[in-house]
């Protein structure tokens, strides 16, 4: 069975709805490139953690440039406007924590990142352990509703 674009949107919305109903902590971790409509569901977490060099958006910079300027070669400019880096998203209150990444790609570095992630997951679970299922759900709802900065233009 082949999914149509409309079905993808419905699947994403359904996933977000189901995540919002959970009464247990939801911890989202972005480790690489989260750039599709499906990335929206990652935002429905009590805590969203992102590796320092990962990117997170609902559209790739190439797609953004193609849509906005009809020129996919303007990818770098699009990426800057999209604010999809961990630093940008932390400042916009989209994510809660940035995990630093070592500069080289040795196995020890991957173990260091894994340990940092484990510590952050354990810390989050410990913080939320005393919360009731309804408090967990409400906290997640409020976090999602209040993320980012909005300016209304008349």
Image: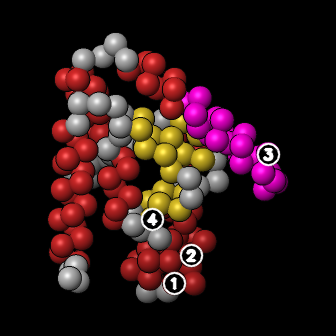
Q: Position of residue 139 (x, y in %)?
A: 28, 27
As drawn, the label of residue 75 is 2
**What segment is highlighted magenta in the picture?**
99-120
Sequence-wise, the earlier of marks 3 and 2 is 2
- Residue annotated with mark 3: 108
Q: Is 110 left, or right, of 2 in this rendering?
A: right
Quote the CA–CA distance across marks 2 and 1: 6 Å
Looking at the figure, which quarter contains the N terminus?
Answer: bottom left
Quote the CA–CA distance across marks 1 and 3: 37 Å
Looking at the rendered image, the disc whose residue lies closer to the viewer, 3 or 2, is 3
Looking at the rendered image, the disc whose residue lies closer to the viewer, 1 or 4, is 4
Q: Position of residue 39 (x, y in %)?
A: 38, 58
Mark 1 crowd level (few <14, some 14–19, many ≥20, 10 Å Cα): some
- Residue annotated with mark 4: 35
Position of residue 126 relative to residue 54, above or below, is above
Looking at the image, do the residues carrying marks 2 and 1 touch, with CB atoms under 8 Å apart? yes
């Amino acid at each position: 069975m082949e999914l149509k674009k409309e079905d993808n949107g419905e699947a994403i919305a359904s996933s977000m709805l189901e995540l919002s109903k959970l009464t247990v902590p939801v911890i989202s971790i972005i480790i690489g490139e989260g750039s599709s409509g499906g990335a929206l569901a990652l935002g429905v977490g009590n805590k969203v953690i992102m590796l320092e060099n990962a990117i997170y958006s609902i559209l790739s910079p190439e797609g953004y440039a193609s849509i906005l300027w009809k020129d996919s070669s303007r990818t770098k400019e699009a990426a800057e406007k999209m604010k999809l880096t961990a630093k940008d998203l932390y400042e916009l209150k989209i994510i809660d924590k940035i995990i630093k990444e070592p500069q080289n790609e040795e196995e020890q570095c991957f173990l260091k990142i894994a340990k940092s992630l484990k510590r952050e997951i354990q810390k989050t679970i410990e913080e939320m352990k005393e919360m009731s299922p309804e408090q967990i759900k409400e906290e997640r709802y409020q976090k999602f509703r209040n993320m980012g900065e909005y300016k209304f233009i008349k």
